[in-house]
Image (cartoon, rainbow, N blue to C red):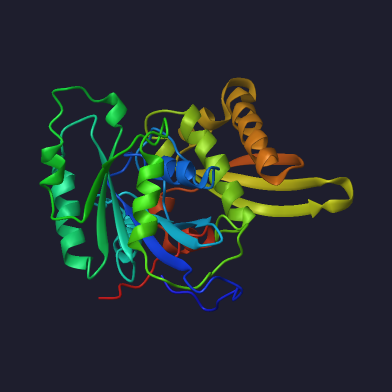
Amino acid sequence: MTFDSILDENIPEDHKSGVIAVVGRPNVGKSTLINAILGTKIAIATPKPQTTRRTQLGIYSTEQVQLLFTDTPGLHAPRNTLGEYMMTVAENALRHTDVILWILDTSEPPQKPDAYIAETIAQKRGDATLILALNKFDLTNERTDFSKFEALIPHDHVLKVSAATGEGVPQLLSTLIASVPEGPRYYPLDQLSDLNMRFIAAEIVREKVMLNTDHEIPHAVAVEITDYKNRDEEERTDIYATIYVERQSQKGIVIGKGGTMIKQVGTEARKDLEEMLGQQVFLDLHVKVLKNWRSNEQFMRRVGYTIPKDED
Protein backbone atom coordinates (compact mmCIF):
# COMPACT_ATOMS: atom_id res chain seq x y z
CA MET A 1 0.00 0.00 0.00
CA THR A 2 1.40 3.40 -0.98
CA PHE A 3 0.49 6.92 0.08
CA ASP A 4 0.61 9.87 -2.31
CA SER A 5 1.14 12.71 0.14
CA ILE A 6 1.82 13.59 3.75
CA LEU A 7 -1.07 15.57 5.19
CA ASP A 8 0.57 16.70 8.43
CA GLU A 9 4.17 17.85 8.73
CA ASN A 10 3.82 19.32 12.23
CA ILE A 11 4.99 16.22 14.06
CA PRO A 12 7.73 15.37 16.58
CA GLU A 13 11.14 14.52 15.14
CA ASP A 14 10.93 10.97 16.53
CA HIS A 15 7.40 10.33 15.23
CA LYS A 16 6.81 6.71 14.21
CA SER A 17 4.50 5.28 11.57
CA GLY A 18 3.99 2.02 9.74
CA VAL A 19 1.64 -0.27 7.86
CA ILE A 20 0.28 -3.33 9.68
CA ALA A 21 -1.07 -6.07 7.39
CA VAL A 22 -3.65 -8.05 9.39
CA VAL A 23 -4.06 -11.58 8.00
CA GLY A 24 -5.53 -14.91 9.01
CA ARG A 25 -8.18 -17.48 8.19
CA PRO A 26 -11.75 -16.28 7.74
CA ASN A 27 -13.63 -15.70 10.98
CA VAL A 28 -10.64 -15.60 13.37
CA GLY A 29 -11.41 -12.11 14.68
CA LYS A 30 -9.36 -9.77 12.47
CA SER A 31 -11.98 -7.04 12.20
CA THR A 32 -12.95 -7.37 15.86
CA LEU A 33 -9.33 -6.96 16.94
CA ILE A 34 -8.81 -3.86 14.79
CA ASN A 35 -11.99 -2.34 16.22
CA ALA A 36 -10.71 -3.13 19.73
CA ILE A 37 -7.36 -1.42 19.06
CA LEU A 38 -9.00 1.68 17.56
CA GLY A 39 -11.60 1.85 20.31
CA THR A 40 -14.40 2.24 17.78
CA LYS A 41 -16.10 0.31 15.00
CA ILE A 42 -14.71 0.89 11.51
CA ALA A 43 -14.84 -2.71 10.19
CA ILE A 44 -17.87 -4.96 10.20
CA ALA A 45 -17.58 -8.17 12.18
CA THR A 46 -19.85 -11.22 12.16
CA PRO A 47 -19.52 -14.90 13.12
CA LYS A 48 -19.80 -15.75 9.41
CA PRO A 49 -16.65 -16.54 7.37
CA GLN A 50 -15.47 -14.14 4.63
CA THR A 51 -17.15 -11.10 6.15
CA THR A 52 -14.36 -8.77 4.99
CA ARG A 53 -14.16 -8.55 1.18
CA ARG A 54 -11.64 -5.78 0.53
CA THR A 55 -8.75 -4.08 2.26
CA GLN A 56 -9.93 -1.45 4.71
CA LEU A 57 -7.52 0.91 6.39
CA GLY A 58 -7.93 1.40 10.14
CA ILE A 59 -5.91 4.36 11.42
CA TYR A 60 -4.57 4.49 15.00
CA SER A 61 -2.98 7.84 15.85
CA THR A 62 -1.39 9.62 18.79
CA GLU A 63 0.94 12.62 18.82
CA GLN A 64 3.90 10.20 18.66
CA VAL A 65 2.77 7.40 16.35
CA GLN A 66 0.44 6.47 13.50
CA LEU A 67 -0.36 2.82 12.73
CA LEU A 68 -2.14 1.98 9.47
CA PHE A 69 -3.97 -1.35 9.84
CA THR A 70 -5.00 -3.07 6.60
CA ASP A 71 -7.91 -5.37 7.46
CA THR A 72 -7.76 -7.99 4.73
CA PRO A 73 -10.15 -10.73 3.58
CA GLY A 74 -9.42 -14.09 5.17
CA LEU A 75 -6.93 -16.18 3.20
CA HIS A 76 -8.77 -19.15 1.69
CA ALA A 77 -9.05 -21.21 -1.49
CA PRO A 78 -11.17 -19.20 -3.98
CA ARG A 79 -14.29 -20.71 -5.56
CA ASN A 80 -15.42 -17.87 -7.84
CA THR A 81 -14.36 -14.46 -9.15
CA LEU A 82 -15.20 -12.81 -5.84
CA GLY A 83 -13.09 -15.39 -4.02
CA GLU A 84 -10.17 -14.82 -6.40
CA TYR A 85 -10.48 -11.07 -5.87
CA MET A 86 -10.45 -11.52 -2.08
CA MET A 87 -7.37 -13.73 -2.23
CA THR A 88 -5.47 -11.25 -4.40
CA VAL A 89 -6.35 -8.42 -2.02
CA ALA A 90 -5.15 -10.40 1.00
CA GLU A 91 -1.89 -11.47 -0.64
CA ASN A 92 -1.13 -7.96 -1.94
CA ALA A 93 -1.49 -6.63 1.61
CA LEU A 94 1.62 -8.61 2.57
CA ARG A 95 3.75 -6.54 0.20
CA HIS A 96 5.21 -3.18 1.17
CA THR A 97 4.20 -3.57 4.80
CA ASP A 98 6.24 -2.96 7.94
CA VAL A 99 4.51 -5.55 10.13
CA ILE A 100 2.46 -8.66 9.41
CA LEU A 101 -0.01 -9.38 12.20
CA TRP A 102 -1.23 -12.97 11.87
CA ILE A 103 -4.37 -13.61 13.89
CA LEU A 104 -4.83 -17.24 14.96
CA ASP A 105 -7.90 -18.78 16.59
CA THR A 106 -6.62 -20.70 19.63
CA SER A 107 -10.05 -22.02 20.59
CA GLU A 108 -9.35 -24.88 18.17
CA PRO A 109 -6.13 -26.62 17.00
CA PRO A 110 -4.30 -25.22 13.94
CA GLN A 111 -6.20 -26.01 10.76
CA LYS A 112 -4.98 -27.13 7.34
CA PRO A 113 -5.48 -23.61 5.87
CA ASP A 114 -3.06 -22.28 8.51
CA ALA A 115 -0.24 -24.19 6.79
CA TYR A 116 -1.22 -22.50 3.53
CA ILE A 117 -1.16 -19.08 5.22
CA ALA A 118 2.28 -19.82 6.70
CA GLU A 119 3.58 -20.70 3.24
CA THR A 120 2.03 -17.55 1.73
CA ILE A 121 3.55 -15.31 4.42
CA ALA A 122 6.95 -16.95 4.01
CA GLN A 123 6.85 -16.27 0.26
CA LYS A 124 5.69 -12.64 0.45
CA ARG A 125 6.96 -11.44 3.83
CA GLY A 126 10.13 -9.70 2.74
CA ASP A 127 11.69 -7.78 5.65
CA ALA A 128 8.42 -7.28 7.52
CA THR A 129 8.25 -8.05 11.25
CA LEU A 130 5.95 -10.99 11.91
CA ILE A 131 3.77 -10.98 15.03
CA LEU A 132 1.50 -13.88 15.98
CA ALA A 133 -1.61 -12.86 17.90
CA LEU A 134 -3.12 -15.93 19.56
CA ASN A 135 -6.73 -14.79 19.68
CA LYS A 136 -9.66 -16.19 21.69
CA PHE A 137 -7.31 -17.44 24.41
CA ASP A 138 -10.12 -16.71 26.89
CA LEU A 139 -11.89 -19.73 25.35
CA THR A 140 -8.94 -22.07 25.91
CA ASN A 141 -8.07 -24.33 28.86
CA GLU A 142 -5.00 -25.86 30.45
CA ARG A 143 -4.88 -28.58 27.75
CA THR A 144 -4.42 -26.06 24.92
CA ASP A 145 -1.01 -26.51 23.28
CA PHE A 146 0.00 -23.00 22.19
CA SER A 147 3.34 -24.31 20.91
CA LYS A 148 1.54 -25.78 17.89
CA PHE A 149 0.63 -22.28 16.78
CA GLU A 150 4.12 -20.92 17.40
CA ALA A 151 5.61 -23.77 15.36
CA LEU A 152 3.69 -22.82 12.21
CA ILE A 153 6.32 -20.29 11.12
CA PRO A 154 9.41 -18.47 12.42
CA HIS A 155 8.23 -15.20 13.96
CA ASP A 156 9.46 -12.15 15.86
CA HIS A 157 6.82 -11.91 18.59
CA VAL A 158 3.87 -13.92 19.90
CA LEU A 159 1.14 -12.61 22.19
CA LYS A 160 -2.09 -14.00 23.61
CA VAL A 161 -5.09 -11.74 23.11
CA SER A 162 -8.86 -11.72 23.25
CA ALA A 163 -10.38 -9.30 20.75
CA ALA A 164 -13.80 -9.88 22.33
CA THR A 165 -12.80 -8.98 25.91
CA GLY A 166 -9.83 -6.71 25.24
CA GLU A 167 -7.39 -8.85 27.23
CA GLY A 168 -3.84 -8.57 25.91
CA VAL A 169 -4.75 -5.80 23.46
CA PRO A 170 -2.69 -3.06 25.23
CA GLN A 171 0.38 -5.34 25.22
CA LEU A 172 -0.15 -6.11 21.54
CA LEU A 173 -0.48 -2.41 20.74
CA SER A 174 2.78 -1.65 22.57
CA THR A 175 4.56 -4.37 20.57
CA LEU A 176 3.20 -3.01 17.30
CA ILE A 177 4.35 0.52 18.13
CA ALA A 178 7.81 -0.76 19.00
CA SER A 179 7.97 -2.63 15.67
CA VAL A 180 7.37 0.28 13.27
CA PRO A 181 10.10 2.72 12.15
CA GLU A 182 10.26 6.48 12.46
CA GLY A 183 8.08 8.05 9.81
CA PRO A 184 5.56 10.74 8.84
CA ARG A 185 1.91 11.22 9.72
CA TYR A 186 -0.10 10.26 6.64
CA TYR A 187 -3.57 11.12 7.94
CA PRO A 188 -5.04 13.69 10.37
CA LEU A 189 -5.10 12.67 14.03
CA ASP A 190 -8.90 12.32 14.09
CA GLN A 191 -9.25 10.19 10.93
CA LEU A 192 -10.05 6.52 11.59
CA SER A 193 -10.44 5.03 8.09
CA ASP A 194 -9.58 5.70 4.46
CA LEU A 195 -13.01 4.60 3.23
CA ASN A 196 -15.78 7.08 2.58
CA MET A 197 -19.12 6.86 4.36
CA ARG A 198 -20.91 5.52 1.28
CA PHE A 199 -18.84 2.34 1.40
CA ILE A 200 -19.02 2.11 5.19
CA ALA A 201 -22.81 2.50 5.03
CA ALA A 202 -23.00 -0.33 2.48
CA GLU A 203 -20.87 -2.52 4.72
CA ILE A 204 -23.05 -1.81 7.77
CA VAL A 205 -26.17 -2.86 5.85
CA ARG A 206 -24.39 -6.02 4.62
CA GLU A 207 -23.31 -6.82 8.18
CA LYS A 208 -26.90 -6.68 9.42
CA VAL A 209 -28.08 -8.97 6.62
CA MET A 210 -25.31 -11.44 7.50
CA LEU A 211 -26.14 -11.37 11.21
CA ASN A 212 -29.86 -11.93 10.65
CA THR A 213 -29.75 -14.65 7.98
CA ASP A 214 -28.32 -18.17 7.67
CA HIS A 215 -27.14 -20.74 5.17
CA GLU A 216 -26.11 -19.38 1.76
CA ILE A 217 -27.58 -15.89 2.19
CA PRO A 218 -24.58 -14.09 3.79
CA HIS A 219 -22.19 -14.96 0.96
CA ALA A 220 -24.75 -14.18 -1.77
CA VAL A 221 -25.32 -10.58 -0.59
CA ALA A 222 -23.83 -7.38 -1.98
CA VAL A 223 -24.95 -3.86 -1.11
CA GLU A 224 -24.83 -0.77 -3.32
CA ILE A 225 -25.51 2.76 -2.08
CA THR A 226 -27.56 4.34 -4.87
CA ASP A 227 -27.88 7.77 -3.23
CA TYR A 228 -26.31 9.48 -0.20
CA LYS A 229 -27.43 12.97 0.80
CA ASN A 230 -26.22 15.11 3.71
CA ARG A 231 -29.02 17.43 4.79
CA ASP A 232 -26.95 19.62 7.09
CA GLU A 233 -29.73 22.14 7.61
CA GLU A 234 -31.92 19.35 9.01
CA GLU A 235 -29.01 17.51 10.73
CA ARG A 236 -30.01 14.39 8.81
CA THR A 237 -28.43 12.01 6.29
CA ASP A 238 -30.56 10.24 3.69
CA ILE A 239 -29.19 6.91 2.47
CA TYR A 240 -30.72 4.79 -0.29
CA ALA A 241 -29.33 1.27 -0.69
CA THR A 242 -29.98 -1.78 -2.86
CA ILE A 243 -29.30 -5.25 -1.46
CA TYR A 244 -28.39 -7.73 -4.21
CA VAL A 245 -28.85 -11.49 -3.97
CA GLU A 246 -28.39 -14.21 -6.57
CA ARG A 247 -31.75 -16.03 -6.50
CA GLN A 248 -35.42 -15.18 -6.11
CA SER A 249 -35.70 -17.46 -3.08
CA GLN A 250 -32.91 -15.49 -1.39
CA LYS A 251 -34.77 -12.25 -2.04
CA GLY A 252 -37.78 -13.64 -0.19
CA ILE A 253 -35.63 -14.55 2.80
CA VAL A 254 -33.98 -11.12 2.98
CA ILE A 255 -37.35 -9.37 2.78
CA GLY A 256 -38.99 -11.78 5.22
CA LYS A 257 -42.66 -12.51 5.85
CA GLY A 258 -44.55 -9.26 5.66
CA GLY A 259 -41.23 -7.40 5.32
CA THR A 260 -40.12 -8.31 8.84
CA MET A 261 -36.54 -9.19 7.94
CA ILE A 262 -35.80 -6.10 5.86
CA LYS A 263 -37.31 -3.93 8.61
CA GLN A 264 -35.05 -5.58 11.20
CA VAL A 265 -31.99 -5.08 9.00
CA GLY A 266 -32.92 -1.44 8.43
CA THR A 267 -33.52 -0.75 12.12
CA GLU A 268 -30.17 -2.23 13.20
CA ALA A 269 -28.21 -0.58 10.37
CA ARG A 270 -29.80 2.82 11.00
CA LYS A 271 -28.87 2.64 14.70
CA ASP A 272 -25.18 2.00 13.92
CA LEU A 273 -25.09 4.69 11.24
CA GLU A 274 -26.65 7.28 13.54
CA GLU A 275 -24.03 6.51 16.18
CA MET A 276 -21.26 6.92 13.61
CA LEU A 277 -22.60 10.10 12.04
CA GLY A 278 -23.95 11.71 15.20
CA GLN A 279 -27.22 12.66 13.55
CA GLN A 280 -30.54 11.26 12.36
CA VAL A 281 -30.41 8.84 9.41
CA PHE A 282 -33.16 8.07 6.92
CA LEU A 283 -32.39 4.64 5.43
CA ASP A 284 -34.28 3.26 2.43
CA LEU A 285 -33.58 -0.38 1.50
CA HIS A 286 -34.58 -2.38 -1.58
CA VAL A 287 -33.74 -5.97 -2.59
CA LYS A 288 -32.94 -7.07 -6.14
CA VAL A 289 -31.88 -10.34 -7.79
CA LEU A 290 -28.72 -10.40 -9.91
CA LYS A 291 -27.85 -13.96 -10.88
CA ASN A 292 -24.26 -15.08 -10.30
CA TRP A 293 -23.07 -11.58 -9.39
CA ARG A 294 -20.05 -13.10 -7.61
CA SER A 295 -18.65 -14.04 -11.04
CA ASN A 296 -19.55 -10.67 -12.60
CA GLU A 297 -16.40 -8.50 -12.63
CA GLN A 298 -18.23 -5.44 -13.96
CA PHE A 299 -20.75 -5.52 -11.14
CA MET A 300 -18.06 -6.13 -8.51
CA ARG A 301 -16.19 -3.04 -9.69
CA ARG A 302 -19.43 -1.08 -9.41
CA VAL A 303 -19.88 -1.99 -5.75
CA GLY A 304 -16.25 -1.28 -4.86
CA TYR A 305 -14.51 -4.63 -5.31
CA THR A 306 -11.89 -3.53 -7.83
CA ILE A 307 -9.61 -6.46 -8.64
CA PRO A 308 -6.03 -5.35 -7.94
CA LYS A 309 -3.11 -6.20 -10.20
CA ASP A 310 -0.65 -8.77 -8.92
CA GLU A 311 2.61 -7.00 -8.20
CA ASP A 312 4.88 -10.08 -8.44
Question: Does residue 91 appear anywhere in the picture?
Answer: yes
> Going by the image, does 93 lie left or right of 300?
left
Q: Quadrant of residue 307?
A: bottom left
Q: Quadrant of residue 125?
A: bottom left
Task: Say which residue appears at 43% left-offset and 57% top-offset.
Answer: 69
Between 205 and 253, which is closer to the camera in this rendering?
205
Front in this rendered view, residue 43 or 215: 43
Residue located farthest toward the front when viewing the structure as drawn: 13
Q: How many marks?
A: 0
Q: Is residue 288 visible?
A: no
Q: Is residue 68 above or below residue 161?
A: below
- Name the residue furthest bottom: 4
Residue at image point 60% right, 58% down: 191
The N terminus lies in which quarter of the figure? bottom left
Q: Position of residue 176 (x, y in %)?
A: 36, 55
As displayed, is residue 227 above or below residue 136? Answer: below
| Left or right, 87 with reference to 287 | left
Instruction: Report the front residue among 195 and 183.
Output: 183
Q: Is residue 29 left or right of residue 149?
A: right
Residue drawn at the location 26% of the way across and 62% of the way down: 129
The residue drawn where x is 50% and y is 73% is 184
Q: Tell me the quadrant of the picture where the C terminus can be found.
A: bottom left
Tell me where residue 248 appears, x and y as whole percent: 49, 36
- Horizontal side of residue 132 vs 169, given as left or right: left
Q: Position of residue 243 (x, y in %)?
A: 56, 43
